[in-house]
Image (tube, grey):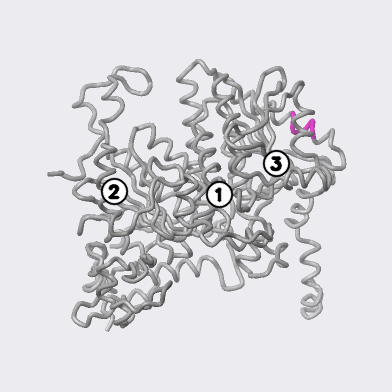
Amino acid sequence: MNITTNIDTATDPALPAGRHRSGQPHRFFQPKRLFSGLSASYLDKRTLQNAKGDIWVKCGRCGELNYVRQFEVNAKVCFKCRHHARLSGGERLASLLDKGSFVEINQDLETADPLSFETATGSYAVKTLAMRHKLGSSEALITGYGTLGGRPLAVAVADFAFMGASMGSVFGEKLVRLIEFAIEHRLAVLTVSSSGGARMHEGLFSLMQMAKTTAALVQLGKQRLPHISLLVDPCYGGVTASYAMVADVILAEPGARIGFAGPRVIEQITRQSLPAEFQTAEFLFEHGMLDGVVERYAIRGMLGELLELLEVPPPLALAIGKDLTGNPSPTEQEQPKTKLLFRVA
Amino acid sequence: MAAPLDEAAVTSQSQDQALNWAWQKVKLARHPLRPRTLYYIKQLCSSYVELHGDRRFGEDTALVGGLACFEGRNVVVVGQQKGIDTNDNLKRNFGMPGAEGYRKALRLFHLAAKFGFPVLSFIDTPGAFPGLHSEERGVAQAIAENLLVMADLPVPIVVSIIGEGGSGGALALGLGDRILMLENSIYSVASPEASATILWRDAQLAPQAAAAMKITAHELYQFGLIDEVVAEPPGGSHLDARTGLQLLREALRRNLAELEAGWSVDQPEAIQYLLKQRYQKFRAMGIWNQRTAAV
């Protein structure tokens, strides 16, 4: 039934995802195509079933039965109560970017195990290996570039299915490399964050990713390149307290829970009863933490408009006639640093 | 080593805990008599004027700071302050600052940048305060903004972890050019209790979590995440605070002198160099595997 499951790589852990035993790209598994459209990624068009074989999907909030085909065309928003169900990283990219425009970079970075960490349920190294093969992505953050309404941008999407999209060394490194990529190619950066926080299994290395990613955003800002942050359910801990909250524009999906400490921790420690709408996107909006709460169907349009208004300026050195060290800038021919990724019509 | 296996198994639980080096450090780092931030500030600096309030909403006594004179130069000092007794702890919220505290620090960082004073930061907190008001006023945003500003502050920053360095609440004062740790202090992504609850689903296993998370000064030094381990008098600083103070003073003086050599707030090149070094320092943190390209 489910033709996209990669049986060969599942049995052979040494083989990277998306490859047949022969080493050639798998016939049915073409990573680039995965993100080309929301329905193409997991919906079997002939039978109108999703990958699990379901025809109906029950809404997580109101319990309404949604017809799977409609539900997925509607980007997994419930028809009755407008509940925004969680999207995988691939689905998120498909819902935001132009069809087929996404190109992933740095997918060859894989989780290491600096602390040789063991938990009650097994070792960290085994767990991440299992995750890699289950999801076919190397880590919790998918980074790359693509176009949105014809406008190029660098994009990082956290995939909550990968260990709660917790931020570890690879997460941080991939994000920093994306930011450096954006600086090199003069692109705006869009981050879509959904995370349980810093990854415990890597100890202080994870905490330091907060400093590392935020410091990289300083470099982006110095080049006058915009960072737009989209917060989706749920977004907590070290991610909220670092790069996700220092963007030029911060948007969130309706009903997304966003905060620093989780509600159960707060109830345990302070013994306060918390209001029902506590830590929702609407709650944060009321308290002045967000620029907007945007429904999923409208996000793409909103981002397109923002990218147009936050027009990426020419390099700073060219604009002010001298580079950062105070020397006069060389002529434009001698500055081939900005590479052309797209030819925008 | 020669003990029979079954006997070892019976006593291993208690022995593990007794011998758990990391857990001893946790206890020392949280010792009620351990010298706190204000002790160090007042003893290290010849004069100190505390500044209050975040100019936005309120005053948070869990985080203290102000202007001071250290070894003949003016500096800005900030740090989380745990209470010295129960009443003081209630007042200071057990050293757990909320958004106001971090915004006070932010204001002091801007002050330091304006006048070109180096920043001495002292970390001693279980973490940022998890509470309704704290979330309402955006403690996460306050921490994130501190990181953003510290990454680009044109003055030298020396961070000293003097007790407990807990999570984002500690890191919000911890992005500096030099990170020193007292020998018996800890620095972790989450408290041992929280880690044990999340990963082992049992807060009683905190000692095991403390060992597994590698949170002691020497381990973190080996990872290259901190720059220097500052020795403490035998048994810990609480037994001989004066000696501990002298050792920290020596380390601070040396690190600050190194950073200040060639640096001046009037020289853009020197500032660029300082900021570049700071960025590279944090840029390099992290460990990963790079998969070789499939043939």
Residue B62's mark?
A: 3
Please report, as a chain letter, where disc 1 is located. Answer: B
Q: Residue B252 appears at what percent x and percent y?
A: 69, 29
Q: Is residue B123 placed above or below B133 in the rendered structure?
A: above
**Mark 1 or 2: the one toward you:** 1
Q: Is residue B28 placed above or below A255 in the rendered structure?
A: above
Q: CA distance from mark 3 to mark 1?
A: 18 Å
Dividing the picture into quadrants, the one containing residue B107 is: top right
Q: Is-magenta flag for residue B248? A: yes
Q: Are marks 1 and 2 in contact (CB under 8 Å)?
A: no
Dividing the picture into quadrants, the one containing residue B37 is: top right
Q: Residue A270 appears at what percent x and percent y?
A: 68, 57
Residue B191's mark?
A: none
Q: CA distance from mark 3 to mark 2?
A: 40 Å
- Provide the secondary structure element on which disc 3 rests: loop
**Residue numbers of the magenta segment:** B245-249
Residue A303's mark?
A: 2
Q: Nearer the viewer, residue B262 or A71?
A: A71
Q: Residues within 10 Å of mark 3 (few under 14, many from 20)?
A: many
Residue at image location 25% in from the left, 73% down from the top: A70
**Mark 3 or 1: the one toward you:** 1
Q: Are marks 3 and 1 in contact (CB under 8 Å)?
A: no
Q: Is residue A52 left or right of residue A301?
A: right
Q: Residue A345 appears at what percent x and percent y?
A: 12, 44
Residue at image location 69% in from the left, 26% down from the top: B253
Q: Is residue A244 placed above or below B292 in the rendered structure?
A: above
Q: Is residue A84 left or right of residue A118?
A: left
* Badge 3 or badge 1: first in the primary sequence: 3
- What residue did someone put label 1 on? B136
Name the amino acid, label 2.
Answer: Leu
